[in-house]
Amino acid sequence: MVWKFGKHSSSIVTSGKNITLDRFFRYVNVFYFSIGMVAYNSEETKNNWSPKARKWTRILLNCYFFCQVLNLNFVLLSELIYVVLAFASANNFLEATMNLCFIGYVVIGVIKIRHIWYQRSQITQVVAHLQQLHPTSERQQAEYMMAKYLRRYRYVSIFYFSMHLVLIWTYNLYWAVYYLIYDFWLGIRTFKRMLPYYCWTPWDWASNWTYYLMYISQNLAGQSCVSGQLAADMFLCALVTLLVMHFKRLGTQIEQHVAGQLTPEQDIEFLQKCIIYHQRLLLLCEDINQIFGIPLLCNFSSSSFIICFMIFQITIGGSIDNLAMLALFLFCSMVQIFMIGSYAQRLINASEQIGQAVYNHDWFGGELRYRKMLLLIIRRAQKPSYVKATMFLNVSLITVTDLLQLSYKFFALLRTMYVK
């Protein structure tokens, strides 16, 4: 179902391409599929695949997914044990603090993967509701400026996941490239077996073939964690982009309407459709917050500590390669927080403009019933829609500023303790 009301602009130019809703989730589905996960049930899969094919595909993906999660938790546990032992023995303090950055990132990745896994039925309902509101014809999509929203979202997504993939594989392949260049190619020095991330195991992996298994295990775990993080963040941003698009379109339709030119019944019908449309968008916002609230709260709560430990590592010095990778990690963490805060701010601005659009349109020519009904949509628009990290935090660019201030306070405290 697509809401059709109001006048159509004669200047609309169609692009000649029909944009499906799944195109907004293309990168999300790719990264979730890479860890054997399907975030929502697609109508295209139901229509094109036989029941038997869907059954066996689901079984294979579930097996692959549980293997990925098991490996990720094994690597996380080994890193945690390393940090605990390092602090208990007062040795390897710098390595332990570096590991805390990775552990915080992995923990958030595990939470996001687990939470989305258990919210798949609710996510399917949200996608189905968006599908009902999705414009299907080229003209309607041009009126919604869908191509522009999709293009901007794709640019942001490509930059976002490219940057993170460069980060994770720089860490993962550093020691492999080190060996190939210095030992295998140049023969300058004897290679000391190292893993991408510091960990503890009950056996000596450096002196036997288990080193290669550990190396592969950590590489797979790193990619699984990044895939879960990227998919969840891009999924949230895609949903917010669609909501902003609908809010903007609703505001434009209201602002272009001239009350009194049509019959009173037609004006009332137009406004009723606007109120219903607005209510559906508000309910979709609540559903999205229920899905992503807990991961967002954990994300913002831990980001201050992650940023703090990374800045601490950079300021105390070290080798140039470690500093470069830490700087890249810090940049990625900052981009992640800013991207989520930026999309959340767009939702706030778009939802607030509904009340302004109602006030700006030519309402004074409508009859009394019409003007009284305007109060319903104006009252709802007084409270903007937020991306909420549960009930404790409304996400916006102000939240990002507060987070950076908190990170600096933690850094100052840690730096003072280290100096003493």
Image: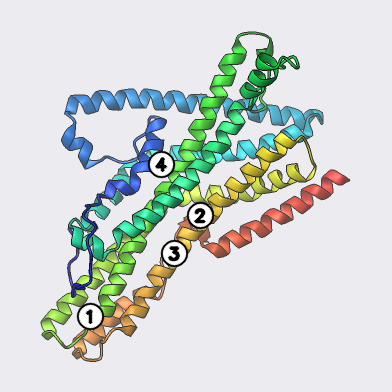
| Three-letter code for the amino acid on which mark 4 is drawn | Ile
Tell me, yes or no, whether the two marked residues, 3 and 2, touch with CB atoms within 8 Å.
no
Q: Helix or strand or loop: what does disc 2 sit on?
A: helix
Closer to the camera in the image, 280 or 225: 225
Residue 396 versus residue 78 in the image, above or below: below
Say which residue label 2 marks.
Answer: 339
Measure the alpha-carbon separation of dots 4 and 2.
20 Å
Residue 371: x and y in percent read: 24, 86
Q: Earlier in the sequence, mark 2 or mark 1?
A: 1
Residue neighbourhood size for the residue with mark 2, other residues' Cα within 10 Å, grouped as few (<14), some (14–19), many (≥20) = many
The answer, for residue 202, to whether it is visible in the render is no
Say which residue label 3 marks.
Answer: 346
Say which residue label 1 marks.
Answer: 257
Say which residue label 4 marks.
Answer: 116
Q: Residue at x 62, y 36 (%)?
A: 102
| Three-letter code for the amino acid on which mark 1 is drawn | His
Residue 42: x and y in percent read: 25, 41
Closer to the camera in the image, 350 or 279: 350
Residue neighbourhood size for the residue with mark 4, other residues' Cα within 10 Å, grouped as few (<14), some (14–19), many (≥20) = many
Q: Choose top left, top right, bottom left or bottom right for residue 7.
A: bottom left
Q: Residue at x 53, y 28 (%)?
A: 221
Tell me, yes or no, whether the two marked residues, 3 and 1, touch with CB atoms within 8 Å.
no
**Which quarter of the rendered picture does the N terminus lie within?**
bottom left
Q: Residue at x 34, y 54 (%)?
A: 150
Q: Earlier in the sequence, mark 3 or mark 2?
A: 2
